Amino acid sequence: MRILFVASEAFPIVKVGGLADVTSSLARALMHLGHDPCLILPRYGSITAPVEDVPGSGFPVSFMGSREQVALQKTTLEGGIPVYLVQNENYLGACQIYDRDELKRFLLFSTSLPEAIARLGLRPDVIHCHDWHTALAPLYLRQAGAEAPCVFTIHNLAYQGPFDREFLLQSGLSTTWQEHTPSEAPEPGLNFMSQGILLADFITTVSPNYASEILTPHYGEGLERLLHYRRNELCGITNGIDYDEYNPATDPHLARNYDSDTIPGRVDNKIALQKECGLPQEYGVPLFGMVSRLEEQKGIDLLLQAIDRFITETGSQLVALGEGREHYQRLLGRLALQFPDRLSVFTGYDERLGRLIYGGADMLLMPSRFEPCGLGQLIAMRYGAVPVVRHTGGLVDTVHDVAQDDGNGYVFQGYTVPELLQAVKRAEAGFYDRDDWQSLMRRNMNLDFSWKASAGKYEEIYLLARDTFRARSG
């Protein structure tokens, strides 16, 4: 099958978060299964990859009461996977991907898609749209009489692309919206996400447990009624990671490479990490790592509430890397100054340091309030860092407490300081049992969270979507 990915990010062309890793690595996994994937993204000003213009590809788009000129460019991912870029200086050319103009940016991108696909002559069997940025694509493709089904993946339901009634009227969405909303469907919310849920042929999300959670008011973010309406076309498929990209045996960002048979050599990464973080370089001290957005979703507020007790009730160190809310960045920075021998904080995006944390920390801490899937725990286990996580979302599907026969980490249930600290203390105690700890590390490193199994499940969805679409179309 020819599978067209419609997305806002793809590594290494443009990356802000885990979405970029998923789109590029899933595309490569599908190629290895014998399919023909390609991607289409906005042409941001920050893209530095070598690109070439697609001859004769310019066309006008009716947009917000005016006409915008759009052109197409092309680059490739590793393996020769084509990536097409939709170019428009006024809305798509910004260097900052997500900013105050993002609604208009992704509206124009989605509006351009039917003509862009036609001019490129792609003729996909399936169009796979990713997250709220592309959630209007099924609407415009349906309006244009697309000859392929749309699969829509919810990567994080909390981000929906909300807008007001003024935007609804100015964009021209109101008329199109009413034409394509089934009479028996719950009224969609004023956001991009609801349209993808309503109009895609199939909906996936990034773990089976999260697929169940979002049907409830607690996790449904106001869209649970709409999701219930489409529940027969909704399924959860756990994300994977690219085992060639995330490989401690070859990762150039590490101080020393290692694999599951040479785990003792991993200590060099721990010492290098402690040195870079300004922490005492002591192999025998448990070292927790965090690589995370500094947002409430990720449990940063819970961590801040627990820090004083972490310092007084454990003997562990903690290094955190991330960016997000300035309030959290400021508070964590102050705490790092207050406890320089126990806590180190780096703000910003740093791929090299992130890899060193995965390859040098003893444990990875993920106290998430909610977590659609999470890639951090998968990367951590690949690198031998034992996950300490809250029982939510995809963390339920991928991390089981060491008290169970198949245990691979430390899990706490409630979103409370005492339960977080109890899990941290259990992990700290486990660390001091060196033989059992190394056995746990080795087992985790030999688990398979690659894209192979997940890509096969997407393949099943694509086949079902294609066959259902063809039967419906006659």
Image (spheres, helix red, strand yellow):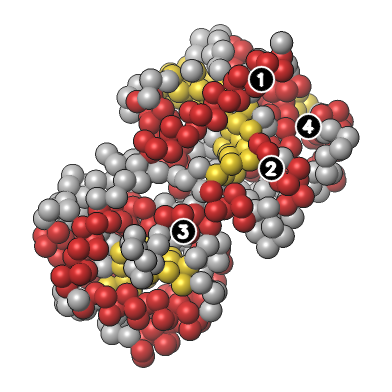
Between 406 and 161, the residue placed more toward the observer is 406
Q: Is 284 displayed left or right of 59 in the figure? A: left
Instruction: Write down the residue under mark 4.
Output: 64
Q: State how far apart marks 2 and 3 are (Cα).
A: 22 Å
Give the mark toward the camera: 3 or 4.
3
Between 124 and 275, the residue placed more toward the observer is 124
- Which amino acid, by three-letter code, is at mark 2? Arg
Q: Is 88 displayed left or right of 362 in the figure? A: right
Indicate which disc, 1 or 4, sits on the residue closer to the N terminus.
4
Residue at coordinates 62% horizontally, 56% vertically from top-left?
Answer: 213
Instruction: Write down the residue under mark 3.
Output: 395
Based on the displayed image, in which of its 4 quarters is residue 346 positioned?
bottom left
Q: Is residue 290 visible?
A: no
Local packing at callout 1 (Cα closer than 10 Å; few below 14, some 14-19, many 20+) is some
Q: State how far apart marks 1 and 2 are (Cα).
A: 18 Å
Local packing at callout 4 (Cα closer than 10 Å; few below 14, some 14-19, many 20+) is some
Indicate which disc, 4 or 2, sits on the residue closer to the N terminus.
4
Indicate which disc, 1 or 2, sits on the residue closer to the N terminus.
2
Local packing at callout 2 (Cα closer than 10 Å; few below 14, some 14-19, many 20+) is some
- Which amino acid, by three-letter code, is at mark 3? Leu
Give the mark toward the camera: 2 or 3.
2
The x and y percentages for residue 422 are 41, 81
Q: Is 461 displayed left or right of 420 in the figure? A: right
Instruction: Write down the residue under mark 2.
Output: 231
Give the mark toward the camera: 4 or 2.
2
Instruction: Write down the residue under mark 1.
Output: 469
All told, the count of numbered labels is 4
Q: State how far apart marks 1 and 4 are (Cα).
A: 31 Å
Indicate which disc, 3 or 4, sits on the residue closer to the N terminus.
4
Indicate which disc, 2 or 3, sits on the residue closer to the N terminus.
2
